[in-house]
Amino acid sequence: MIDDMNNGLIGTIITKDLSRLGRDYLKTGTYLEIIFPQNNVRYIAINDGVDSETDSNEFIGIRNYFNDYYAQDISKKIRSVKTAAMNRGERTNGSVPYGYMLNPDNPKQYLVNPETAPIVKRIYELSAAGYGVAKIQKILEDDKAISPAIYLFQKYGSLRGKPDPSRPYNWPKRTIRRMLSNPEYLGATVCGKTYSKSNKLKKRISVPRSEWKIFENTQEPIVDRKLWDMVQKKFDGRKKANKTGLTDKYAGYLYCAECGARMYINRAKSLKETQECYTCGTYQTKGSHHCSYHYIRAVVLDELVLNRLREITAFARENPAEFYEIAKSKAEKESKKLIKISKGEITAVQKRITELDGIIRCLYEDRVAGRITPERFELLVSGYEQEQAEQKQKLENLNNEISIQGTRDKKISEFIESAKKYIDITEVTPEILHAFIKRINIHERAIPRSQKCGNQIDIYYTFEADEMLSV
């Protein structure tokens, strides 16, 4: 219609009322005051009694503003309803993750899709085995696994993801990356991943992962916790694969002992596999003024870790009772200290949450009594509710820390059982690392860059508390 108007094919535009022309008072005013007169177009709004050829149009601007305000008010109410639903753990988006399907008896619940769930699990297993995203992409193509976009197109006729029927086995790398970091495959409901700034802006803005609302155990998981943890641990570090498509097995495990930064592997076509090495991430990005090189060759690290693992697993396997007592004694000292600190913080957080409840209640009473305006009420309450949500998340994290300390005995027993399972460890693999090791700290050599003196390494095993995790 706009094109026809610009081409001189329209002389009069009639709508039921002004709101049917538009609710954005700035754009609507631009059309009424500038664009229509420029194109000699007469505008009539029947119910509002508006006719651009008469002089009875003095209140058009006010009406446009109220139409705009009505749209904003409806938007706020819808946002409030959706926010409340998200806080209850209810799904508010219409998309279903690949691997799941909607429960026909309860549209708000997911069921495992027997057609696609095995493909999701295979992707996780390949990633845990050390394969990079590009290699996984090639394996899926060779196996003729239908991509999510094509599956939705064939099943429901959906055009989501811009499916290309000529390439049914083409898996975009970004799709695989998102799948490997999606908590919903662990059986959780995830809310609040995106938001829009205004009802006038259609663009969705991503929310930091730390601010997502995650509700555990809301549907049957496709991957178990052990497999999930292995993949996430690897994704904590650099994900670039080598020539064979395998990623760095130490990604997420290796840290600089001095500055606490991650250490990254250095690879190049000119380097042989035996020449690959790790260096401090701070040194790589900020230079020698902030931290030193911390150079250690990958093959040397493998040898050191392998020898340590063989020693401790042999001791745990041959002397389980003694190993248990030693590990428990050390863990108890660490746990008591950490639990004391955490309980003190929990008391302070609980007190602040109670204070915020009182503040919000008083604000509501002031709003009802008319002592503050609705706009001021919305502004203040949203700030206090945001702080309260942050405090509740902090409280949950602190309780989780205490829970972890309380399960230390179980972790020691699991370590002993793993030692009995892996009797002959011949190489360091992602599975071996996940079974026994939490973190490895690499110290600088006594003589930096020396070819004769080696690095001291500190290995934190799965049953130990790691003091540097907060660095």
Image: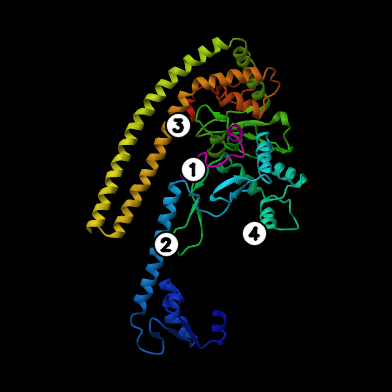
Q: CA distance from mark 2 to mark 1?
A: 24 Å
Q: CA distance from mark 3 to mark 4?
A: 41 Å
The magenta stretch spans which residues?
210-230
Q: Counting residues from the N terminus, which is met first, the one under dot 2 or under dot 1?
A: 2
Disc 2 secondary structure class:
helix
Q: Which amino acid type is shown beneath numbered disc 4?
A: Ser
Asked where in the image residue 5 lies, by quadrant, the reply is: bottom right
Disc 3 secondary structure class:
helix
Could you tell me if the residues under marks 1 and 4 are in contact, i.e. CB atoms within 8 Å? no
Label 1 belongs to which residue? Answer: 214
| Side (left or right) of 141 relative to 48 | right
State the colouring used for the structure image: rainbow
| Side (left or right) of 126 relative to 76 | right
Q: Residues within 10 Å of mark 1 (few under 14, many from 20)?
A: many
- Place of residue 462 in the rendered image (x, y in percent of width and height, measured from the top left): 55, 24
Determine the residue positioned at 51% across, 60% down: 203
Label 3 belongs to which residue? Answer: 400
Q: Examine the structure image and report whether residue 219 is included in the region drawn in magenta.
A: yes
Q: CA distance from mark 3 to mark 1?
A: 14 Å
Disc 1 secondary structure class:
strand
Height in image: 24 above or below 186? below
Label 2 belongs to which residue? Answer: 75
Q: Counting residues from the N terminus, which is met first, the one under dot 2 or under dot 3?
A: 2
Q: Examine the structure image and report whether residue 461 is included in the region drawn in magenta.
A: no
Label 4 belongs to which residue? Answer: 158
Q: Residues within 10 Å of mark 4 (few under 14, many from 20)?
A: some
Closest to the observer: 176 or 114? 114
- Place of residue 219 in the rendered image (x, y in percent of width and height, measured from the top left): 55, 42
Mark number, residue 120: none
| Side (left or right) of 4 relative to 465 | right
